[in-house]
Image (cartoon, rainbow, N blue to C red):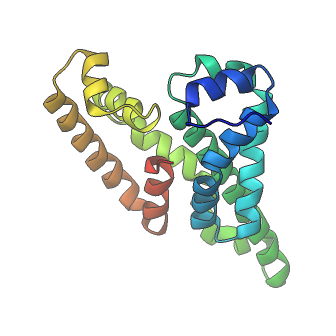
Amino acid sequence: MHEVKQYDEQSILDRVAQGDAGAFETLYLQYRDKIIYFGWKFLQSEAKAEDVLQEVFLKVWTRREELPQIRNFKAWLTAITRNHIYNALRRLSVEEKFIKEFSHKGETAEQAAAPDKLSLIELQTALDKAVGALTTQQKKVFELSRFEGLRHEQIAEELDISRDTVKKHMTDALRKVRGRMSSHKELAHLSLLLILFRL
């Protein structure tokens, strides 16, 4: 197996795109612990965190030909990880509803699941609405920062605005997202972490 003496991500991504299994293993080892950490943090299960890791890197491999064109691999991988964690949370929510259905024999399935009507299963919708409520410029800054992983300086160059303006838009965007998500009470903290965490 070819050894990479110094981690050169772009070179590794190019090799993975060509089907280089050794480069893929290097990429896997580079991000494995970070993905496991976030998977465990939200799912509270080492086994489920491992499942997320496997699903994420299966997607990386099946979409390997796209890798050289990805502007910010770290942000791209973050988005995939977030989506898989969200899907895992949805599965857990469904499992909990089944447990409630069979443990509350005197209640209907709808009654047993009632406390979960606005729960993890609606997390993505709530987050999308919170981000969608931002002004056009706030949304651009927020998405470039959180979804594409750009620094304030890069965003300023991309949008042709000052760094201070970027900082103001980002501050306002975060305040608005927090304000909208606070109405979900028990989901607020988790929702923000899911949308804001970075690998």
Q: Quadrant of residue 113?
A: bottom right
Q: Quadrant of residue 9?
A: top right
Vertical comparison of 139 with 115: above or below:
above
The front one of 174 and 77 is 77
Quarter of the image with the N terminus is top right
* Residue 163 vs residue 117, the one in the foreground: 163
Q: Is residue 52 visible?
A: yes
Q: Position of residue 81 (x, y in %)?
A: 62, 46
Q: Is residue 175 left or right of residue 79?
A: left
User: What is the quadrant of residue 67 in the picture?
Assistant: top right
Residue 54, position in %: x, y? 77, 49
Relative horizontal placement of residue 86, taking residue 72 as reference (left or right):
right
The x and y percentages for residue 63 are 75, 26
In the figure, 136 relative to 169: above or below?
above
Residue at horizontal 51 percent and vertical 48 percent from the top: 199
Q: In terms of depth relative to the viewer, which is nearer, 60 or 127?
A: 60
Q: Position of residue 177 (x, y in %)?
A: 35, 47
Residue at screen point 49% across, 40% down = 128
Above or below, 31 relative to 65: below
Task: Name the residue: 31% across, 17% down.
Answer: 158
Q: Nearer the viewer, residue 130 or 73?
A: 73
**In the image, what residue occupies the spot 71% across and 43% down?**
56
Total numbered badges shown on the rendered structure? 0
- Residue 190 as seen in the image, left or right of residue 86: left
Res. 119 visible in picture: no
